[in-house]
Amino acid sequence: MSRKPALAVVGATGAAGAVMLQILSQHADVWGDIRLLASPRSAGRKLAVRGEECEVLALDEDTLRGVDVAVFLVPEDVAARWAPIAAAQGAVVVDASAAFRMDPDVPLVVPEINPHAVRVRPRGIVASPGCTTLALIVAVGALHAEFGLSELVVSAYQAVSGAGQAGVAALREQLSTVAGTRLGTTPGDVRRAVGDDTGPFAGPVALNVVPWSGTPQQDGWSSEELRIRDETRKILDLPGLRVAATCVRVPVVTAHSVSVHARFERAVTVERAHEILATSPGVVLYDDPAAGDFPTPADVVGTDPTWVGRVRRSLDDDRALDFFVCGDNLRKGAALNTAQVAESVAAELTAGLAAGRSAGEAAYAVD
Amino acid sequence: MSRKPALAVVGATGAAGAVMLQILSQHADVWGDIRLLASPRSAGRKLAVRGEECEVLALDEDTLRGVDVAVFLVPEDVAARWAPIAAAQGAVVVDASAAFRMDPDVPLVVPEINPHAVRVRPRGIVASPGCTTLALIVAVGALHAEFGLSELVVSAYQAVSGAGQAGVAALREQLSTVAGTRLGTTPGDVRRAVGDDTGPFAGPVALNVVPWSGTPQQDGWSSEELRIRDETRKILDLPGLRVAATCVRVPVVTAHSVSVHARFERAVTVERAHEILATSPGVVLYDDPAAGDFPTPADVVGTDPTWVGRVRRSLDDDRALDFFVCGDNLRKGAALNTAQVAESVAAELTAGLAAGRSAGEAAYAVD
Ligand SMILES: NC(=O)c1ccc[n+]([C@@H]2O[C@H](COP(=O)([O-])OP(=O)(O)OC[C@H]3O[C@@H](n4cnc5c(N)ncnc54)[C@H](OP(=O)(O)O)[C@@H]3O)[C@@H](O)[C@H]2O)c1
Ligand SMILES: NC(=O)c1ccc[n+]([C@@H]2O[C@H](COP(=O)([O-])OP(=O)(O)OC[C@H]3O[C@@H](n4cnc5c(N)ncnc54)[C@H](OP(=O)(O)O)[C@@H]3O)[C@@H](O)[C@H]2O)c1
């Protein structure tokens, strides 16, 4: 059998799924059959990928059969249930949810940083980090390689599409309510106008910021905040790294921003940091505030890289850098990283046959 | 002469000025004559204060004459020029601008923290801190008194009214442009829709966040960021305090938020931090995320205190606390702090006569 690997996009109708379909149409085409899966609610819908209309099928054991690589862009509980089923049927699963990220038998992969980790996947599952970790990790990882990271203090400015289509719908609706009004000047006026239904957020997000994402965890921390700590430690292989993260939702549609204070083992300079960031794959350095050059979500949305600006050395500590990163949470923050990982698996499977290897997974040749 | 001191509100027509007039109508009335001053553009306008219509006069040497206390709520260059003139004519000036904050002969006063500093004012001028410093300093100062502050890493979520009426107008206008559209999903679409005129901001602020406020200073820092460092050091009398601040403008009308990572000399606990914050004047502790209780700008706008929530001890450092503060930048962040300082000067002047003192300044009795 001489064919390209077959891909399933599970969650093709979601916010990250829509971007995955764009990416599959834009990137070099390494896939054979592409199958689009979602909930039974979406079965029968038609979506375009690689210039062709493709019917969405309901996710079940049948529709997962014959798939070589399955990217999962679905809620955590759906991934927790179905990823092992897909893996048991022979697919390599690349999962964008939080379901398996901390599983010691599941690698957590960012191709710019730990590309080789993808090869060791005892469960047949590879995880992609959360969108806020992905917004900062490529830049932080590049600086770590040079200076040795010892501590991170980060505050996130999270876009609403980080909470999927429902998050975008909530902001659009709330914005229609507040625009053209005098709201935002008396206590609770925005809350009263928006009403009790604030969608997936813990408060109104139009004309407001909401310092909470995820679920309550130990000692007042949110799940989103602890994930940044856990995922960064795992990806950089720094189990003792000090991390303090604060996640705040802001009224931006797409592209997360993070204010980063990073302390290193060695002294830093802005000049050297600039050199590193300017030459790191996946990073764009955009840092000349006097000329108005710094990344903002409105400028980086829809683009692939991690944008970095506002690079400053601490005035009180020559081993600390402050900087501001922006990245599209649906691209690098979800679909793009997942696609990159899936493509590396495809290359591996294809090369496997070329080299005559058989690693317990099916091996392929390009036709 | 037996009278209450005469007050001039310089900048009565501005964003902070409007809130000052509200406060003067709400607080115990310690003032005799109140005079409203602004630019010649506003001369003749009528504004309500203490339930009466009052005509706005153009600021000049004549209209400053006979004033005992002058609160300045005008741009920095206007304050730099006119505050010394008002002081030379015998008024005690309380200035909300940045013009004199770092002058060693001008005290920088937050009544909850360093009330006595107001007494020593060789130039006859007292300064009020910037709105972002004021958003965090009351809470940080209370914790410092117990634990001994050694370092601050802060990221601000600054409301547009921090840039005055022009900032509010810019956001309102931009929101009307973006609401009801699909903007915010392709690179630069918000920027193109909003156009080149982004008001007082370095980029579009609707559906966006802008990591820049103020003017460029040394080594990539902005003036707003360095002010937080300088002002915090001066108010807390900690000249060597390590401070790294990042200022980001967000699409919120009024109320600044700050994500604070504070390291102390002594070990901290959340329980003790809660006790301190719950009993500190000027602070409201609002911290039960599981019940949805944390401060947001939409809830605290129009209120006086500093609201504190999300109090967490660092998981990796028992001397560090993370928390989130919100405060109305026009109230405590500008007009309220200025009014508090002015009222303490009024009390001092009044008590001066009662005690028979004459400190080179006019002294008064309550009539
Ligand atoms: N959004 C981000 O920035 C981001 C970043 C990193 C990771 N992630 C992760 O990626 C995943 C998807 O996020 P999203 O933002 O794209 O969410 P979303 O917009 O809510 O989309 C969810 C997708 O999952 C599908 N789905 C839901 N229940 C299903 C079921 N029982 N069986 C099969 N499919 C089901 C939905 O199909 P229907 O349309 O049929 O309901 C839809 O395609 C989540 O785990 C999220 O944590 C998201
Ligand atoms: N907004 C805040 O959150 C905040 C917080 C802390 C400190 N501050 C400081 O408070 C000051 C006022 O801020 P704002 O936000 O209220 O600004 P604003 O809304 O722009 O108001 C400016 C005020 O200054 C007056 N003014 C301008 N030029 C003048 C001149 N040549 N002579 C006399 N009056 C003049 C204006 O009068 P016209 O209406 O006649 O032009 C108006 O009353 C600034 O120094 C600011 O840095 C503001």
Image (cartoon, coloured by chain):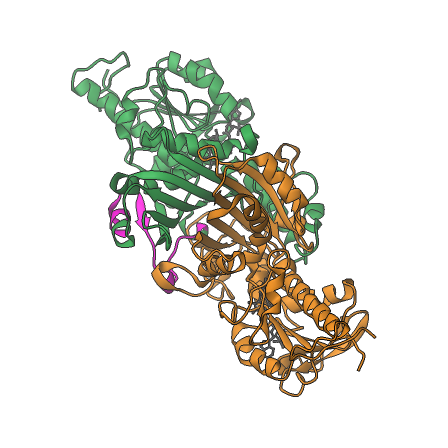
Chain colours: A orange, B green
Residue at the front extreme of this rendering: A356
> Which quarter of the figure is the N terminus of chain A placed in?
bottom right
Query: For the point 64% across and 59% down, which residue is it?
Result: A111
As displayed, is residue A358 above or below residue A185? Answer: below
B310 drawn magenta: no
As displayed, is residue B248 above or below residue B78? Answer: below
Of the four image quadrants, the one with ligand 1 is bottom right
Residue at the right extreme of this rendering: A367
Residue at the left extreme of this rendering: B355
Q: Quadrant of residue B52?
A: top left
> Which quarter of the figure is the C terminus of chain A placed in?
bottom right
**Can residue A173 be seen here?**
no
Q: Quadrant of residue A107?
A: bottom right
A168 relative to A185 in the view: left or right:
right
**Can residue A335 be seen here?**
yes
Q: Which residues are magenta?
A: B274-297
A93 relative to A149 in the view: left or right:
right
A224 relative to A139 in the view: left or right:
left
Looking at this view, is B82 or A229 the one in front? A229
Looking at this view, is B128 or A147 the one in front? A147
Looking at this view, is A170 or A38 the one in front? A38
Expressed as whole percent of the image width and height from the top left, the position of residue B37 reads 46, 24
Looking at this view, is B310 or B59 the one in front? B310
Label total for image: 0
B104 relative to A194 in the view: left or right:
left
Expressed as whole percent of the image width and height from the top left, the position of residue B199 reads 62, 37
Query: For the point 64% across and 56% down, which residue is it?
Result: A112
Expressed as whole percent of the image width and height from the top left, the position of residue B122 reads 33, 15
Expressed as whole percent of the image width and height from the top left, the position of residue A319 reads 48, 38
